[in-house]
């Protein structure tokens, strides 16, 4: 039990490494949370820093989700509550990072890493649908919400274990909470579309 707690805490600390904040400081000497949407994630990195840094942030955020779940696999095996808890802890760390005054991103890239490791096929199918929605609407936030909403549905279809199913529902709740302002803006037609640029040094959404 003590070791399980240790790997969950380590997963939170791993998730708390905000690559968007670090790369923005390294490349531009800025706090990315003061630019664009104010979000420390891959989409805002694309808006503020460009494609290269955005791809790096996306890949690194996905990898930390994968690594966290593998810590849980190492501790208790695949399909276990510990593996699911490690994934959730990494997402919590990304959203509320201890190293950066608990001001992080919205956790979608890390969620992709977590869910793809816990349940590859349900996550893949949900991901394809989400990507199609982004391609059609150019709303990354909408695609993100579709991904987290559909993953539990496909988990039920594929008959995955309860730890994975319940973790997907908790992760979906986190995502909808973190995107609550985006949901309002989508409904009002004010949401930023992918490819939009930041305006000066001010937050634009």
Image (tube, rainbow, N blue to C red):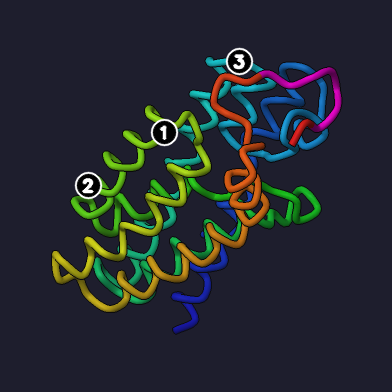
Residue that mark 3 sits on = 50
Q: Nearer the viewer, residue 72 or 62?
A: 62
Helix, strand or loop status at disc 3: loop
Rounded to the nearest whole Å, what is the CA distance between mark 2 and mark 3?
28 Å
> Which numbered disc flags the more N-terminal residue, 2 or 3?
3
Chain part drawn in magenta = 197-203
Residue 94 pos. (x, y %): 60, 51
> Which numbered disc flags the more N-terminal residue, 1 or 2?
2
Helix, strand or loop status at disc 2: helix
Residue 134 image label: 1
Circle 1 or circle 2, nearest the eye:
1
- Image quarter where the C terminus lies is top right
- Give me the residue at 32% from left, 57% from top: 150
- Give me the residue at 23% from left, 51% from top: 120
Label 2 close to label 3 by CB (< 8 Å): no
Q: Quadrant of residue 26?
A: top right
- Give me the residue at 14% from left, 65% from top: 158
Rounded to the nearest whole Å, what is the CA distance between mark 1 and mark 2?
15 Å
């Amino acid at each position: 039990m003590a070791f399980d707690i240790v790997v969950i805490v380590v997963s939170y600390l791993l998730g708390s490494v905000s690559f968007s904040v670090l790369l923005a400081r390294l490349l531009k000497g800025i706090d990315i949370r003061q630019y664009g949407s104010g979000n420390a994630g891959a989409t805002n990195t694309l808006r503020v820093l460009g494609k290269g840094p955005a791809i790096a942030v996306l890949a690194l955020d996905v990898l930390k989700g994968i690594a966290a779940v593998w810590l849980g696999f190492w501790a208790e095996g695949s399909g276990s509550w510990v593996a699911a808890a490690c994934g959730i802890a990494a997402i919590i760390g990304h959203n509320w990072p201890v190293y950066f005054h608990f001001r992080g991103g919205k956790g979608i890239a890390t969620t992709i890493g977590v869910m793809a490791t816990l349940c590859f096929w349900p996550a893949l199918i949900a991901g394809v649908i989400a990507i199609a929605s982004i391609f059609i609407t150019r709303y990354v936030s909408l695609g993100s919400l579709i991904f987290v909403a559909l993953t539990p549905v496909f988990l039920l279809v594929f008959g995955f274990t309860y730890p994975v199913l319940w973790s997907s529902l908790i992760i979906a709740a986190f995502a909808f909470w973190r995107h609550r302002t985006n949901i309002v803006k989508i409904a009002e037609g004010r949401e930023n579309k992918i490819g939009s640029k930041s305006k000066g040094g001010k937050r634009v959404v």
